[in-house]
Image (cartoon, rainbow, N blue to C red):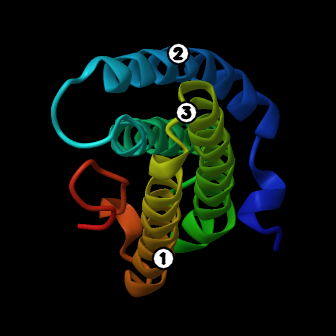
């Protein structure tokens, strides 16, 4: 029997996610702009990380929804195997890509504005939060053992 990752229609998924990616990149720029304009709540770079984390949760929800939709259009049921083979790798890839992009943004912003003393705490906060997010996702997929229908990234918790 083929694994879900072998049967999953990646071409359709890529089409669905490409528009989402454009929307999220636009939101990401707006999020950074808001962080720079905020006068309260700590450093600009920490505000940037926090804003990008909120946006990442939204992005993960949308990717999760798109993958499930593609799978169901193919006439397949969402199973724990599908979550492990398709959803989790897609989420981990997105988290890794966003981590790199936000880290680069922090470094660039710090260099441009002379805020290099704020860079290290922001990078540490970023690394901590992204590692926590990956661990929560791995734990969520392992802990459900066949009952993953409620697993979805959310703003407050990754696994209900």
Which residue is identified by label 3? 114
Q: Residue at x 45, y 42 (%)?
A: 56
Residue 26: x %, y % from top left: 52, 13
Q: From the viewer's perspective, is 54 left or right of 99?
A: left
For the residue pair 84 and 52, the one nearer the viewer reads as 52
Cα gap from disc 1 to disc 3, whole angstroms: 33 Å
For the residue pair 23 and 125, the one nearer the viewer reads as 125
Q: Which quadrant of the structure image shows residue 67?
A: top right
* Disc 1 to disc 2: CB gap under 8 Å: no
Which residue is identified by label 1? 135
Which residue is identified by label 2? 23
Q: Residues within 10 Å of mark 1 (few under 14, many from 20)?
A: few
Q: Is residue 65 above or below residue 160?
A: above
Residue 40: x %, y % from top left: 16, 32
The mark lying in front, picked from 3 and 2, is 3
**Pointer 3 or 2: first along the chain:** 2
Residue 60: x %, y % from top left: 47, 44
Assign a secondary structure to mark 1: helix
Q: From the viewer's perspective, is 116 left or right of 46?
A: right
Cα gap from disc 3 to disc 2, whole angstroms: 30 Å
Q: Residue at x 78, y 39 (%)?
A: 10
* Disc 1 to disc 3: CB gap under 8 Å: no
The mark lying in front, picked from 1 and 3, is 3
Q: Residue at x 50, y 62 (%)?
A: 130
């Amino acid at each position: 029997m083929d694994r879900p990752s072998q049967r999953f229609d990646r071409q359709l998924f890529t089409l669905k996610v490409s528009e989402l990616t454009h929307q999220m990149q636009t939101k990401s720029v707006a999020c950074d702009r808001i962080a720079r304009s905020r006068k309260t709540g700590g450093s600009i770079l920490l505000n940037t990380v926090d804003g990008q984390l909120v946006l990442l949760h939204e992005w993960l929800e949308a990717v999760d929804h798109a993958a499930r939709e593609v799978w169901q259009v193919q006439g397949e049921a969402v199973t724990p195997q599908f979550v492990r083979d398709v959803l989790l790798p897609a989420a981990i890839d997105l988290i890794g890509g966003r981590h790199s992009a936000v880290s680069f943004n922090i470094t660039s912003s710090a260099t441009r504005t002379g805020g290099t003393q704020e860079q290290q705490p922001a990078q540490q906060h970023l690394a901590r939060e992204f590692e926590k997010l990956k661990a929560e996702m791995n734990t969520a997929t392992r802990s459900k053992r066949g009952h993953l229908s409620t697993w979805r990234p959310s703003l407050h918790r990754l696994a209900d």
